[in-house]
Amino acid sequence: MSIEKFRPMKTHGKLNWAIAAGKIPFLCTGKEPDFISYDQLSILNTCEKDAEISLLIFYEDEKPVGDYKIKVKARRLRKIRFNDLIDLEAMQMERNFACCIKSNVPVVVQFSRMNTGAAANSEIATVAFPIEN
């Protein structure tokens, strides 16, 4: 099927999202980068305009850290590992965290975790919580 049948594409998503159950596992059983444990965001931008994303990280016993700036090109998907967020401050491993995500255009956000700390690897994924605009 031709992509032309999908144009003009409807914009999907919300401007604001939240993740409440982050915790980057420390232990790994394989070689980097493929088998390192991680928490990750998948951000889908169906708009005709680039998405400018701002992430604010919350810990249990510290002030929030942010704004981490991410760009997702128009009509693209981008995956961002929390492990790679180091510009303001490196993410802390084995610490409970939450994240608020703000965008200038509607996006869809999914959260996933890869835990390679045991002989049998496991992955979980869930849609982030959309916050009404």
Image: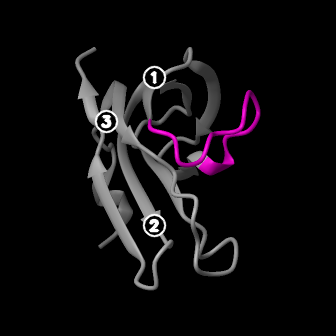
Residue on which disc 3 sits? 11
* Mark 1 or mark 2, earlier in chain: 1
Residue 52 point in image, percent of width and height? 57, 27
Q: Is residue 110 magenta?
A: no
Quarter holding the N terminus is bottom left
* Identity of the residue drawn at 53% across and 51% down: 78
**Magenta residue span:** 83-96
The disc at residue 115 is 2
Q: Earlier in the sequence, mark 3 or mark 1?
A: 3
Instruction: Give how far across and how far down residue 104 sits, in percent.
Output: 48, 21
Residue 21 drawn above or below residue 78: above
79 or 22: which is nearer to us? Answer: 22
Q: Amino acid at mark 1?
A: Lys
Other residues around mark 3 within 10 Å, as few (<14) / some (14–19) / many (≥20): some
Residue at position x 59%, y 75% from top? Answer: 35
Residue furthest out toward the right = 87
**Residue appearing at x 73%, y 31% in the figure:** 89
Q: Secondary structure at mark 2?
A: strand
Asked if the stretch drawn in magenta spans residue 86, the answer is yes
Towards the viewer: 18 or 63: 63
The residue at which mark 1 appears reads as: 102
**Residue 84 x %, y %:** 67, 48
